[in-house]
Amino acid sequence: MDDYVGITEKAQAVVLTLQRPKARNALTLDMVRSLRRSLDDAVADTSTQRIVIRSEVPGTFCAGGDIRAVRDQVLEGRIDEAMQFFEEEFALNHAIANCPKPLVALVAGTCSGRRLWSRASRRL
């Protein structure tokens, strides 16, 4: 799993913790993949009743995608890698918005894409 995403299980819940403080939890492709894999596993696991996404970083939930890294990829001519990030990040956003299990996003502080995360949390 990704070093910036912690995964724990508590009381029939899977807790996904964003932990990339120096970048305000800006998502890397590895983080997106880790979150998606964990979300898919939690949905498939019949013992999981809910999914929680939280931040370990005080005052920050998630600054969105790591656009600096994507920009660097584009400037270096690695366009396919940059496009892969957006393809997988948007697929993760779609999976979160359409998650069949209750999903709680503990948002406090900085959060890009708040509307999507709020929509997922409101379904509880």
Image: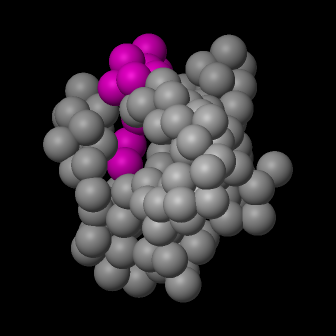
Left or right: 20 in relation to 123: right
Position of 45 relative to 29 (above/below): above
The question of residue 100 being in magenta is answered with yes
Residues 32 and 52: in front is 32
Which residue does the image show at 54% across and 84% down from the upper left? 22
Left or right: 100 in relation to 82: left
Which residue does the image show at 24% across and 27% down from the upper left? 123
Q: Is residue 14 visible?
A: no
Rendered image quadrant of residue 111: bottom left
Which residue does the image show at 44% across and 75% down from the upper left? 24
Left or right: 94 in relation to 110: right
- Whole-percent x and y of residue 25? 49, 68
Left or right: 74 in relation to 123: right
Q: Bounds of the magenta span?
A: 94-105
Position of 28 relative to 9 (above/below): below
Q: Can residue 103 be seen in this view?
A: yes
Rendered image quadrant of residue 3: bottom right
In the rendered image, the quadrant that contains the C terminus is top left
Which residue does the image show at 58% across and 73% down from the upper left? 20
Residues 92 and 51: in front is 92
- Whole-percent x and y of residue 96? 42, 30
The question of residue 101 being in magenta is answered with yes
- Whole-percent x and y of residue 97? 34, 26
Farthest residue, direction right: 1
- Whole-percent x and y of residue 63? 36, 65
Position of 64 relative to 23 (above/below): above
- Number of marks in the image? 0
